[in-house]
Amino acid sequence: MIKVVGSVALVLLAVAFSFGRKEETLKELIARTEASRPDQQPDLYMEAADRQRKAAMEAMKAEHWEEFDADLQDIVSFCDKARAAAIGSTKHIKNTEIRIRRISNHLKDIKLDVALDDQPKLQVVVNKLEEFRTELLRRMFGGKGND
């Protein structure tokens, strides 16, 4: 009986803690990323890139195009930092490539939803992400010429 009550109390405490915790801001996430160990940075930078992808989608829906453009540049920056950290630490290369591919595919899917004048800017971002992916794939499968 005491074990059951203790287990229930522990679960309730964990649930209360998770609801009471506010979401980390992007600035806090970046600060934590930069202070973290190199092998942890790729995943944290990709989390930041995914948050910016979501923010870009919201900006696009609200037709805040300057914000959309800034979010796209942040996506490129965070993916580049994740790529560099993955290569530098030789950890999480595959996962980083997969996450960059998901973001790239999502941006390709929405390309037709933006104005005709904005499509080339979006394509430049997609091309840059594809360059990052190619470099990561070379690191994984390219053989001896990668060092």
Image (spheres, rainbow, N blue to C red):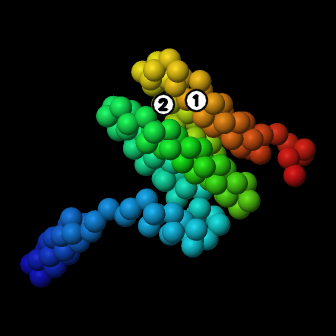
Q: Residue furthest right?
A: 145
Q: Quadrant of residue 121?
A: top right
Residue 62 in picture, x, y percent from top left: 31, 34
Front label number (2 vs 1): 1
- Where does the image place residue 140, in percent across and percent down from the top left? 74, 44
Q: Which residue is at 18% across, 70% downward?
A: 16
Q: Secondary structure at mark 1?
A: helix
Please state if 9 lies on the left or on the right of 125 as rendered: left
In the image, what residue type sits under mark 1?
Lys
Compare residues 81 and 88 and report the one nearer the observer.
81
Q: Is residue 112 above or below residue 28?
A: above
Residue 94 located left or right of residue 107: right
Q: Residues within 10 Å of mark 1 (few under 14, many from 20)?
A: some
Residue 1 is left or right of residue 94, and the answer is left
Mark 2, other Cα within 10 Å: few <14 / some 14–19 / many ≥20: some
Nearest to the observer: residue 59 or residue 19: 59
Identify the secondary structure beneath mark 2: helix
Give, as a three-letter code, the residue at label 2.
His
Q: Which residue shows up at 50% across the image and 44% down it?
A: 70
x, y percent for residue 85: 67, 58
Q: Is residue 25 above or below residue 63?
A: below
Determine the residue positioned at 77% across, 45% down. Answer: 139
Residue 106: mark = 2
Give the vertical position of 78 relative to 134 (above or below). below
Mark yes or no: residue 97 visible: yes
Q: Earlier in the sequence, mark 2 or mark 1?
A: 2
Q: CA distance from mark 2 to mark 1?
A: 15 Å
Quadrant position of residue 65: top left
**Residue drawn where x is 62% and y is 53% of the image:** 82
Residue of label 1: 121
